[in-house]
Protein backbone atom coordinates (compact mmCIF):
# COMPACT_ATOMS: atom_id res chain seq x y z
CA UNK A 1 0.00 0.00 0.00
CA UNK A 2 1.27 3.48 -0.82
CA UNK A 3 1.75 5.97 1.98
CA UNK A 4 -1.59 7.53 2.88
CA UNK A 5 -2.04 11.18 3.88
CA UNK A 6 -1.99 12.00 7.59
CA UNK A 7 -5.58 13.25 7.42
CA UNK A 8 -6.74 9.69 6.58
CA UNK A 9 -4.65 7.74 9.06
CA UNK A 10 -4.80 10.15 12.00
CA UNK A 11 -8.21 9.01 13.24
CA UNK A 12 -8.68 8.46 16.95
CA UNK A 13 -8.60 4.84 18.13
CA UNK A 14 -12.04 3.27 18.48
CA UNK A 15 -11.91 2.50 22.19
CA UNK A 16 -15.62 1.76 22.41
CA UNK A 17 -15.26 -1.11 19.96
CA UNK A 18 -12.19 -2.29 21.90
CA UNK A 19 -14.30 -2.58 25.06
CA UNK A 20 -16.79 -4.74 23.15
CA UNK A 21 -14.04 -6.99 21.78
CA UNK A 22 -12.36 -7.50 25.12
CA UNK A 23 -15.67 -7.91 26.94
CA UNK A 24 -16.84 -10.64 24.55
CA UNK A 25 -14.61 -13.21 26.27
CA UNK A 26 -15.48 -12.15 29.85
CA UNK A 27 -18.29 -14.22 31.45
CA UNK A 28 -21.20 -12.07 32.71
CA UNK A 29 -19.75 -8.94 31.08
CA UNK A 30 -21.88 -5.80 31.47
CA UNK A 31 -21.17 -2.86 29.19
CA UNK A 32 -21.68 0.75 30.15
CA UNK A 33 -19.56 1.62 27.13
CA UNK A 34 -21.90 1.31 24.23
CA UNK A 35 -24.31 4.21 23.52
CA UNK A 36 -27.23 2.10 22.32
CA UNK A 37 -30.85 3.03 23.02
CA UNK A 38 -32.81 0.63 25.27
CA UNK A 39 -34.57 -2.17 23.41
CA UNK A 40 -37.77 -1.10 25.21
CA UNK A 41 -37.44 2.38 23.66
CA UNK A 42 -37.74 1.01 20.11
CA UNK A 43 -41.35 0.66 18.89
CA UNK A 44 -40.72 -2.70 17.24
CA UNK A 45 -44.33 -3.59 16.37
CA UNK A 46 -45.03 -0.19 14.82
CA UNK A 47 -41.86 -0.34 12.74
CA UNK A 48 -42.63 -3.92 11.66
CA UNK A 49 -46.10 -2.90 10.52
CA UNK A 50 -44.76 0.22 8.80
CA UNK A 51 -42.15 -1.88 6.97
CA UNK A 52 -44.73 -4.41 5.84
CA UNK A 53 -46.92 -1.67 4.39
CA UNK A 54 -43.96 -0.11 2.59
CA UNK A 55 -42.91 -3.42 1.03
CA UNK A 56 -46.45 -4.36 0.04
CA UNK A 57 -47.20 -0.83 -1.25
CA UNK A 58 -45.97 0.90 -4.44
CA UNK A 59 -42.82 -1.12 -5.32
CA UNK A 60 -41.33 1.50 -7.66
CA UNK A 61 -41.26 4.00 -4.84
CA UNK A 62 -38.63 1.95 -3.02
CA UNK A 63 -36.99 0.09 -5.89
CA UNK A 64 -36.03 3.03 -8.07
CA UNK A 65 -33.63 5.88 -7.34
CA UNK A 66 -35.19 8.48 -5.06
CA UNK A 67 -34.59 12.24 -4.81
CA UNK A 68 -31.01 13.12 -3.84
CA UNK A 69 -32.10 15.28 -0.91
CA UNK A 70 -34.38 12.59 0.54
CA UNK A 71 -37.96 11.31 0.41
CA UNK A 72 -40.09 14.42 0.02
CA UNK A 73 -42.84 13.47 2.49
CA UNK A 74 -40.27 12.65 5.17
CA UNK A 75 -38.45 15.93 4.52
CA UNK A 76 -41.70 17.85 4.95
CA UNK A 77 -42.72 15.97 8.07
CA UNK A 78 -39.27 16.51 9.59
CA UNK A 79 -39.42 20.25 8.92
CA UNK A 80 -42.90 20.33 10.52
CA UNK A 81 -41.53 18.57 13.61
CA UNK A 82 -38.64 21.05 13.78
CA UNK A 83 -41.19 23.88 13.67
CA UNK A 84 -43.43 22.35 16.33
CA UNK A 85 -40.89 20.81 18.69
CA UNK A 86 -37.88 23.12 18.27
CA UNK A 87 -39.69 26.28 17.10
CA UNK A 88 -37.43 26.61 14.07
CA UNK A 89 -38.44 28.76 11.12
CA UNK A 90 -38.03 27.17 7.70
CA UNK A 91 -37.67 30.48 5.84
CA UNK A 92 -34.71 30.23 3.41
CA UNK A 93 -33.83 26.89 5.00
CA UNK A 94 -33.57 23.45 3.44
CA UNK A 95 -33.27 19.95 4.76
CA UNK A 96 -31.02 17.15 3.57
CA UNK A 97 -31.87 13.61 4.67
CA UNK A 98 -28.78 11.55 5.48
CA UNK A 99 -27.68 8.08 6.42
CA UNK A 100 -27.81 8.90 10.13
CA UNK A 101 -27.00 12.38 11.40
CA UNK A 102 -23.46 11.06 11.78
CA UNK A 103 -22.98 11.37 8.04
CA UNK A 104 -23.02 15.15 8.46
CA UNK A 105 -19.99 15.02 10.76
CA UNK A 106 -17.73 14.25 7.80
CA UNK A 107 -19.79 15.94 5.11
CA UNK A 108 -19.82 19.37 6.75
CA UNK A 109 -16.04 19.88 7.13
CA UNK A 110 -15.46 18.31 3.73
CA UNK A 111 -17.83 20.88 2.22
CA UNK A 112 -16.80 24.08 3.95
CA UNK A 113 -13.19 23.68 5.12
CA UNK A 114 -9.78 24.14 3.54
CA UNK A 115 -6.99 21.89 4.80
CA UNK A 116 -5.41 23.40 7.91
CA UNK A 117 -8.55 25.17 9.12
CA UNK A 118 -9.29 25.05 12.83
CA UNK A 119 -12.56 23.72 14.21
CA UNK A 120 -13.51 24.58 17.80
CA UNK A 121 -15.01 21.71 19.78
CA UNK A 122 -15.60 20.92 23.43
CA UNK A 123 -12.42 19.55 24.99
CA UNK A 124 -14.18 16.17 25.04
CA UNK A 125 -16.46 15.56 22.07
CA UNK A 126 -18.06 12.79 20.03
CA UNK A 127 -15.22 10.71 18.52
CA UNK A 128 -16.75 10.55 15.03
CA UNK A 129 -17.05 14.34 14.92
CA UNK A 130 -13.36 14.70 15.81
CA UNK A 131 -12.45 12.14 13.15
CA UNK A 132 -14.62 13.87 10.57
CA UNK A 133 -12.71 17.09 11.23
CA UNK A 134 -9.31 15.36 11.08
CA UNK A 135 -10.18 13.43 7.93
CA UNK A 136 -10.96 16.72 6.20
CA UNK A 137 -7.38 17.81 6.96
CA UNK A 138 -8.51 20.21 9.68
CA UNK A 139 -7.50 20.62 13.29
CA UNK A 140 -9.96 20.10 16.13
CA UNK A 141 -9.14 22.63 18.86
CA UNK A 142 -10.56 21.53 22.22
CA UNK A 143 -12.12 24.34 24.26
CA UNK A 144 -12.27 23.89 28.05
CA UNK A 145 -15.74 23.29 29.48
CA UNK A 146 -17.43 23.58 32.84
CA UNK A 147 -20.85 22.39 33.95
CA UNK A 148 -22.55 24.92 31.64
CA UNK A 149 -20.65 23.76 28.57
CA UNK A 150 -17.93 25.38 26.44
CA UNK A 151 -16.32 28.38 28.18
CA UNK A 152 -16.86 31.50 26.02
CA UNK A 153 -13.64 33.30 27.08
CA UNK A 154 -11.58 30.26 26.08
CA UNK A 155 -13.50 29.96 22.81
CA UNK A 156 -12.90 33.61 21.99
CA UNK A 157 -9.20 33.31 22.75
CA UNK A 158 -8.93 30.36 20.33
CA UNK A 159 -11.10 32.00 17.68
CA UNK A 160 -8.92 35.11 17.68
CA UNK A 161 -6.29 33.09 15.74
CA UNK A 162 -8.42 33.83 12.67
CA UNK A 163 -7.87 30.27 11.43
CA UNK A 164 -11.26 28.92 12.48
CA UNK A 165 -14.05 27.76 10.19
CA UNK A 166 -16.71 26.49 12.57
CA UNK A 167 -17.68 25.63 16.13
CA UNK A 168 -18.93 22.09 16.80
CA UNK A 169 -21.29 21.78 19.77
CA UNK A 170 -23.71 19.25 21.25
CA UNK A 171 -25.69 21.63 23.49
CA UNK A 172 -28.10 19.04 24.92
CA UNK A 173 -26.83 16.17 27.11
CA UNK A 174 -23.45 16.28 25.46
CA UNK A 175 -21.66 13.13 24.36
CA UNK A 176 -19.58 12.18 26.36
CA UNK A 177 -20.08 14.44 29.41
CA UNK A 178 -23.90 14.65 29.59
CA UNK A 179 -23.56 18.43 30.12
CA UNK A 180 -26.32 20.73 28.88
CA UNK A 181 -25.21 24.16 27.69
CA UNK A 182 -27.03 26.99 29.48
CA UNK A 183 -29.00 29.60 27.53
CA UNK A 184 -26.43 32.30 28.35
CA UNK A 185 -23.64 30.09 26.98
CA UNK A 186 -25.59 29.38 23.81
CA UNK A 187 -26.03 33.11 23.26
CA UNK A 188 -22.36 33.78 24.03
CA UNK A 189 -21.19 31.06 21.61
CA UNK A 190 -23.45 32.47 18.90
CA UNK A 191 -22.10 36.00 19.49
CA UNK A 192 -18.50 34.78 19.18
CA UNK A 193 -19.40 32.93 15.97
CA UNK A 194 -20.85 36.19 14.65
CA UNK A 195 -17.82 38.25 15.72
CA UNK A 196 -15.29 35.88 14.08
CA UNK A 197 -17.55 34.87 11.19
CA UNK A 198 -17.67 31.19 12.06
CA UNK A 199 -20.31 28.60 11.25
CA UNK A 200 -21.84 26.61 14.10
CA UNK A 201 -22.61 22.90 13.70
CA UNK A 202 -25.30 22.23 16.30
CA UNK A 203 -25.43 18.45 16.79
CA UNK A 204 -28.63 17.53 18.61
CA UNK A 205 -29.37 13.80 18.44
CA UNK A 206 -30.34 13.67 22.14
CA UNK A 207 -32.34 16.94 22.32
CA UNK A 208 -35.74 15.32 22.84
CA UNK A 209 -34.52 12.94 25.55
CA UNK A 210 -34.94 15.31 28.50
CA UNK A 211 -36.10 13.69 31.74
CA UNK A 212 -35.37 16.56 34.15
CA UNK A 213 -35.49 20.39 34.01
CA UNK A 214 -36.75 22.69 31.26
CA UNK A 215 -36.04 22.72 27.54
CA UNK A 216 -33.54 25.37 26.44
CA UNK A 217 -33.88 27.04 23.00
CA UNK A 218 -31.59 25.69 20.30
CA UNK A 219 -28.76 27.86 18.98
CA UNK A 220 -30.41 27.46 15.57
CA UNK A 221 -33.46 29.33 16.91
CA UNK A 222 -31.21 32.38 17.54
CA UNK A 223 -29.69 32.20 14.07
CA UNK A 224 -30.40 35.58 12.42
CA UNK A 225 -27.56 35.39 9.90
CA UNK A 226 -27.71 31.78 8.71
CA UNK A 227 -24.53 30.51 10.30
CA UNK A 228 -26.00 27.53 12.18
CA UNK A 229 -26.41 24.09 10.65
CA UNK A 230 -28.67 21.94 12.81
CA UNK A 231 -28.16 18.16 12.77
CA UNK A 232 -31.00 15.91 13.96
CA UNK A 233 -31.56 12.18 14.09
CA UNK A 234 -34.25 9.52 14.29
CA UNK A 235 -31.72 7.11 15.84
CA UNK A 236 -32.41 7.90 19.48
CA UNK A 237 -36.17 8.42 19.24
CA UNK A 238 -37.15 5.67 16.79
CA UNK A 239 -34.44 3.25 15.67
CA UNK A 240 -30.69 3.58 15.26
CA UNK A 241 -30.53 0.69 12.80
CA UNK A 242 -32.74 2.41 10.23
CA UNK A 243 -29.97 5.03 9.90
CA UNK A 244 -32.03 8.14 9.18
CA UNK A 245 -30.89 11.62 10.17
CA UNK A 246 -30.75 15.07 8.60
CA UNK A 247 -29.07 18.47 8.29
CA UNK A 248 -31.17 21.63 8.37
CA UNK A 249 -29.83 25.05 7.44
CA UNK A 250 -29.26 27.73 4.82
CA UNK A 251 -30.79 26.57 1.52
CA UNK A 252 -27.74 27.45 -0.60
CA UNK A 253 -25.31 25.69 1.70
CA UNK A 254 -27.52 22.58 1.93
CA UNK A 255 -27.61 22.40 -1.87
CA UNK A 256 -23.81 22.43 -2.07
CA UNK A 257 -23.60 19.78 0.65
CA UNK A 258 -26.03 17.61 -1.27
CA UNK A 259 -23.73 17.69 -4.31
CA UNK A 260 -20.64 16.92 -2.21
CA UNK A 261 -22.54 14.08 -0.52
CA UNK A 262 -23.58 12.55 -3.83
CA UNK A 263 -20.00 12.78 -5.06
CA UNK A 264 -18.82 10.56 -2.25
CA UNK A 265 -21.65 8.24 -1.29
CA UNK A 266 -23.78 7.93 -4.43
CA UNK A 267 -27.05 8.57 -2.62
CA UNK A 268 -26.49 6.11 0.19
CA UNK A 269 -29.78 6.54 2.04
CA UNK A 270 -32.26 3.94 0.77
CA UNK A 271 -35.85 4.95 0.03
CA UNK A 272 -36.92 1.80 1.89
CA UNK A 273 -35.70 2.99 5.29
CA UNK A 274 -36.90 6.55 4.72
CA UNK A 275 -40.41 5.30 3.99
CA UNK A 276 -40.35 3.01 7.02
CA UNK A 277 -39.39 5.99 9.21
CA UNK A 278 -42.08 8.16 7.59
CA UNK A 279 -44.80 5.53 8.08
CA UNK A 280 -43.73 4.89 11.66
CA UNK A 281 -43.85 8.60 12.49
CA UNK A 282 -47.37 8.78 11.03
CA UNK A 283 -48.51 5.83 13.13
CA UNK A 284 -47.04 6.93 16.46
CA UNK A 285 -48.19 9.67 18.79
CA UNK A 286 -44.61 10.92 18.97
CA UNK A 287 -45.13 13.27 21.89
CA UNK A 288 -46.46 10.65 24.29
CA UNK A 289 -44.13 7.96 22.94
CA UNK A 290 -41.06 10.18 23.56
CA UNK A 291 -42.40 11.03 27.02
CA UNK A 292 -42.37 7.30 27.78
CA UNK A 293 -38.75 6.97 26.62
CA UNK A 294 -37.77 9.94 28.80
CA UNK A 295 -39.50 8.40 31.82
CA UNK A 296 -37.66 5.13 31.23
CA UNK A 297 -34.27 6.82 30.80
CA UNK A 298 -34.83 9.02 33.87
CA UNK A 299 -35.38 5.88 35.97
CA UNK A 300 -32.38 4.12 34.45
CA UNK A 301 -30.14 7.11 35.08
CA UNK A 302 -31.31 7.28 38.71
CA UNK A 303 -30.59 3.57 39.15
CA UNK A 304 -26.99 3.95 37.96
CA UNK A 305 -26.48 7.07 40.11
CA UNK A 306 -27.98 5.35 43.16
CA UNK A 307 -25.51 2.49 42.82
CA UNK A 308 -22.57 4.81 42.25
CA UNK A 309 -23.39 7.14 45.12
CA UNK A 310 -23.74 4.25 47.53
CA UNK A 311 -20.15 3.11 47.05
CA UNK A 312 -18.09 5.83 45.31
CA UNK A 313 -15.14 7.49 47.03
CA UNK A 314 -15.79 11.08 48.12
CA UNK A 315 -13.14 12.58 45.84
CA UNK A 316 -14.78 11.32 42.62
CA UNK A 317 -16.97 13.87 40.79
CA UNK A 318 -20.05 12.59 39.05
CA UNK A 319 -21.86 14.85 36.57
CA UNK A 320 -25.59 14.14 36.66
CA UNK A 321 -27.30 14.72 33.32
CA UNK A 322 -30.82 16.08 32.74
CA UNK A 323 -31.35 13.83 29.76
CA UNK A 324 -29.60 11.88 27.02
CA UNK A 325 -27.63 8.71 27.62
CA UNK A 326 -24.43 9.42 29.56
CA UNK A 327 -23.01 10.05 33.02
CA UNK A 328 -19.48 11.48 33.29
CA UNK A 329 -17.20 10.47 36.12
CA UNK A 330 -14.16 12.62 36.90
CA UNK A 331 -11.51 10.62 38.72
CA UNK A 332 -9.03 12.13 41.17
CA UNK A 333 -5.32 11.98 40.28
CA UNK A 334 -4.72 9.08 42.66
CA UNK A 335 -6.79 6.86 40.29
CA UNK A 336 -5.11 6.78 36.85
CA UNK A 337 -7.91 6.19 34.35
CA UNK A 338 -6.09 3.41 32.45
CA UNK A 339 -5.73 1.38 35.65
CA UNK A 340 -9.34 2.06 36.59
CA UNK A 341 -10.49 0.95 33.15
CA UNK A 342 -8.58 -2.35 33.52
CA UNK A 343 -9.98 -2.88 37.05
CA UNK A 344 -13.50 -2.38 35.69
CA UNK A 345 -12.83 -5.00 32.99
CA UNK A 346 -11.47 -7.41 35.63
CA UNK A 347 -14.81 -6.95 37.37
CA UNK A 348 -16.67 -7.66 34.12
CA UNK A 349 -17.77 -4.05 33.49
CA UNK A 350 -16.97 -1.97 30.39
CA UNK A 351 -16.52 1.82 30.61
CA UNK A 352 -14.93 4.28 28.15
CA UNK A 353 -11.86 6.35 29.03
CA UNK A 354 -11.90 10.09 28.27
CA UNK A 355 -9.07 9.80 25.76
CA UNK A 356 -11.60 8.32 23.30
CA UNK A 357 -13.18 11.79 23.19
CA UNK A 358 -10.23 14.13 23.72
CA UNK A 359 -9.85 16.74 20.99
CA UNK A 360 -6.24 17.11 22.06
CA UNK A 361 -4.77 13.62 22.38
CA UNK A 362 -1.90 15.05 24.46
CA UNK A 363 -4.47 15.85 27.15
CA UNK A 364 -6.51 12.66 27.42
CA UNK A 365 -8.08 13.56 30.78
CA UNK A 366 -8.80 11.32 33.77
CA UNK A 367 -12.50 10.61 33.32
CA UNK A 368 -14.84 7.86 32.15
CA UNK A 369 -18.14 7.87 30.27
CA UNK A 370 -20.94 5.65 31.53
CA UNK A 371 -24.00 4.78 29.45
CA UNK A 372 -27.25 4.21 31.33
CA UNK A 373 -29.75 3.45 28.56
CA UNK A 374 -28.72 -0.02 27.44
CA UNK A 375 -28.63 -2.27 30.52
CA UNK A 376 -31.81 -3.13 32.48
CA UNK A 377 -32.53 -0.93 35.52
CA UNK A 378 -31.68 -3.60 38.16
CA UNK A 379 -28.33 -4.30 36.53
CA UNK A 380 -27.50 -0.62 36.32
CA UNK A 381 -27.75 -0.15 40.07
CA UNK A 382 -25.59 -3.21 40.74
CA UNK A 383 -23.04 -2.21 38.10
CA UNK A 384 -22.91 1.32 39.53
CA UNK A 385 -22.14 -0.16 42.95
CA UNK A 386 -19.33 -2.31 41.55
CA UNK A 387 -17.54 0.45 39.70
CA UNK A 388 -18.18 2.89 42.55
CA UNK A 389 -16.50 0.50 44.96
CA UNK A 390 -13.48 0.25 42.65
CA UNK A 391 -12.76 3.96 43.20
CA UNK A 392 -11.88 3.09 46.80
C1 LIG B 1 -23.19 13.53 19.41
C2 LIG B 1 -23.62 12.58 18.37
N1 LIG B 1 -23.81 13.03 17.13
C3 LIG B 1 -24.20 12.21 16.14
C4 LIG B 1 -24.43 10.88 16.39
C5 LIG B 1 -24.80 10.00 15.23
O1 LIG B 1 -26.07 9.50 15.30
P1 LIG B 1 -26.79 8.83 14.06
O2 LIG B 1 -25.81 8.77 12.93
O3 LIG B 1 -27.22 7.50 14.51
O4 LIG B 1 -27.94 9.74 13.73
C6 LIG B 1 -24.24 10.35 17.66
C7 LIG B 1 -24.45 8.92 17.93
O5 LIG B 1 -24.22 8.37 18.94
C8 LIG B 1 -23.82 11.23 18.69
O6 LIG B 1 -23.59 10.81 19.93
Image: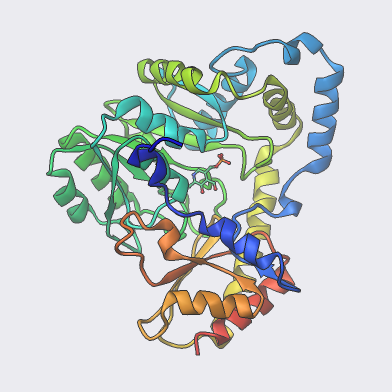
Task: Identify the residue at horizontal 80%, vertical 29% (top origin).
Answer: 50
Question: Picture quarter containing residue 301?
Answer: bottom right
**Residue 90, how many percent across, how many down?**
44, 21
| Residue 244 location, quadrant | top right
Q: Residue at x 38, y 34 (%)?
A: 221
Query: Can residue 211 be spotted in the picture?
Result: no
Is 22 left or right of 259, judged from the image as shown? Answer: right
Residue 1 shows up from this direction: yes
At 37% from the left edge and 29% from the top edge, which residue is drawn?
110
Tell me the colour scheme of the image: rainbow
Where is residue 131? Give x, y as percent.
Answer: 41, 44
Residue 118 in percent (x, y) is at: 24, 41
* Residue 112 position by quadrant: top left
Determine whether 106 is above or below 275 in the image: below
Percent position of residue 344, x then y = 58, 77
Up/down of 142 relative to 94, above or below: below
As drawn, the residue found furthest toward the front would be 1
Residue drawn 46% across the image and 33% down it:
104
The one nearer the camera, 266 or 152, is: 266
Count of numbered circles on the image: 0
Left or right? Give the position of 367 relative to 23.
left
Looking at the image, residue 216 lies above or below residue 264: below
Q: Is residue 205 above or below residue 305?
A: above
In this rendering, position of residue 37 left or right of residue 335: right
Q: Is residue 374 left or right of residue 157?
A: right
Amino acid sequence: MKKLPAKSVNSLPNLIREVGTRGASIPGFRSLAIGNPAAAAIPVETIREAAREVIEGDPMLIMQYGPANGYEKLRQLTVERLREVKHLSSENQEILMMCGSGQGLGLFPRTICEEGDEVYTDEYAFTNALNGIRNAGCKPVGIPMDEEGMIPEALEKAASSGKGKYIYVIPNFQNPTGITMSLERRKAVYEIAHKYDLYIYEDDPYGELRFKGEDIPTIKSMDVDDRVIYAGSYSKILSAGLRVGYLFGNAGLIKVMQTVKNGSDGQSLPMLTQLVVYNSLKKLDMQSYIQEICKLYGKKCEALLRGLKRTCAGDVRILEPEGGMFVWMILPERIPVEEYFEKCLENAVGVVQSKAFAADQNHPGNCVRLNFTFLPEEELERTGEIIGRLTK
